[in-house]
Amino acid sequence: MKTSTPDQVEIRIPRRAEFVRVARMAACALASQLEFTYDIIKDIELAVGEACANAVEHVSDDARDEIVVRFSIDSTQLAVEVFDRGQGFDPARAAEAGAASMENWDDPGGLGLVVIREVMDELAVDCDPTSGTCVRMVKRRSR
Amino acid sequence: MPMNPREAAEAKEATKRGPVKRKSKRDAATPELFAKYQKTRDPQVREELILAHMNLVRYLARKFANRGEPLEDLTQVGMIGLMNAIDRFDPSRGIRFATYATPTIVGEIRRYFRDRGWAVKVPRRLQEMNLAANKAIDELTQKLNRPPTVPELAREMEISEQEALEAMELGDLYELPSLDGEMGGESDEARSKLADYVGQVDEGIEKFERRVRLAEALSSLSPRERKIIELRFFDNLSQTQVAQRLEISQMHVSRLQQRALAKLRESVREQDNE
């Protein structure tokens, strides 16, 4: 089976919680093009939502207060990259900090990454104090 | 599903107790509790650990709550993941418990959706919601003299705005086979109507907390009804196959099955009310 150049869809949303939904909906619409089953579509939606929520939580003074979500889709997989200009965070430390914040389960931060790793096939987090954070995740079609 | 009645009952019990009344010292004491539990396997310590981490289960279950299953059910299956994680957790390995337990809990919740044939059922539900949304839009348009906004629609339908959007946007993305259409191959035994399948899942045969009660409910059936339920839902035979096996017509199987399911529903409901 040939793999062509993936189609790309990129959306920019303000870094605010109420816009995360837009990214989630886009994820659903794109995932359904790949004929993922509905539970997988909702898993992808959840993962994208978690990554965006993480981005919303990074406090930043940067004027470019937005999140960029780039979807790359071909016949075999859906890849999603969530960029933000936040100060970045160390994923390991974030997970620990999240896990440690037993007092506040509404905001355990790093656990979002643990959830993403569980529902997606690949997860990579790239943090750079100057350029920001990129969460890259992939869901492959199993058939 | 690898859940035995004891686990199910335990999970249900634990969920019923409601949110933990947080003692300020509890979190600080958790590593000690784990160490103690690892050494003693004391059920009381296990219980304390379960209570201390119930909010983690709730937090994770909430993430899956927009999929149309009751949060309570998700929390219950999540509790099973929590209990397994507590039993297997090794505090000496330096990983935090919440990080360790999250995959297990999420795994149980996702399995719950998988085991319920959810991927088949929910697009159907979405499509129904899409129809309902269209109807509500018509009614609201009449009432308001203009088309409703999404928040208005969501209020009218008593669903979240996200669900309302989904119903409108995604409900018709799926190419759904007709409910009465036949699934499977050409051969007779491969044929079963989607409605049968959906019905099967809807009856909650797979639903763990009802499993326990199902045994009791089954005793309310006549031997023949019980046989049909057994062949249809436990052995997964088609109605045609059941008909051949029992040497009666497929129509008759269908009628007996309807009656048996109605009885089961009734019986489970009665137990619910007790």
Image (spheres, rainbow, N blue to C red):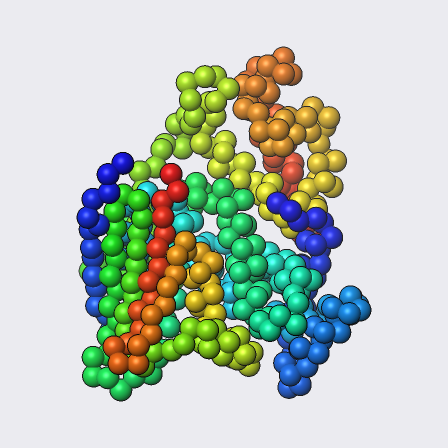
Which residue is nearer to you in this view: A92 or B219?
A92
Q: Position of residue B215 (x, y in %)?
A: 72, 40
Whether residue A5 is situated above or below residue A70 in the rendered picture? above
- The number of callouts visible is 0
Residue A140 x %, y %: 36, 48
Q: Is residue B151 visible?
A: no
Quadrant including the C terminus of chain A: top left
Classify residue B69 as left or right of residue A129.
Answer: right
Whether residue B243 is visible here, answered yes or no, is yes
Q: Quadrant of residue A116?
A: bottom left
Horizontal side of residue A106 vs B94, given as left or right: left
Residue B226 image position (x, y, % from top left)? 69, 29
Please state the horizontal and vertical placement of residue B212, each as a whole percent of the image. 70, 46
Q: Looking at the figure, which quarter contains the N terminus of chain A?
A: top left
Image-quadrant location for residue A103: bottom right
B139, A28: nearer the viewer = A28
Residue at 74% over, 53% down: B6
Q: Does B216 sit left or right of A136 as displayed?
A: right
Decide if residue B19 is on the left or right side of residue A29. Answer: right
Against B207, residue A44 (above or below) is below
Residue that appears at 24% across and 42% down: A3
- Identify which residue is drawn at 33% across, 74% down: A127
- In front of the other: B219 or A124: A124
Residue drawn at the location 59% of the way across and 17% of the way down: B243
Tell me which corner region of the image, top left, top right, bottom left or bottom right, holds residue B173: top left
Toward the front, the furthest residue is: B93
Q: Is residue B8 above or below residue B245?
A: below
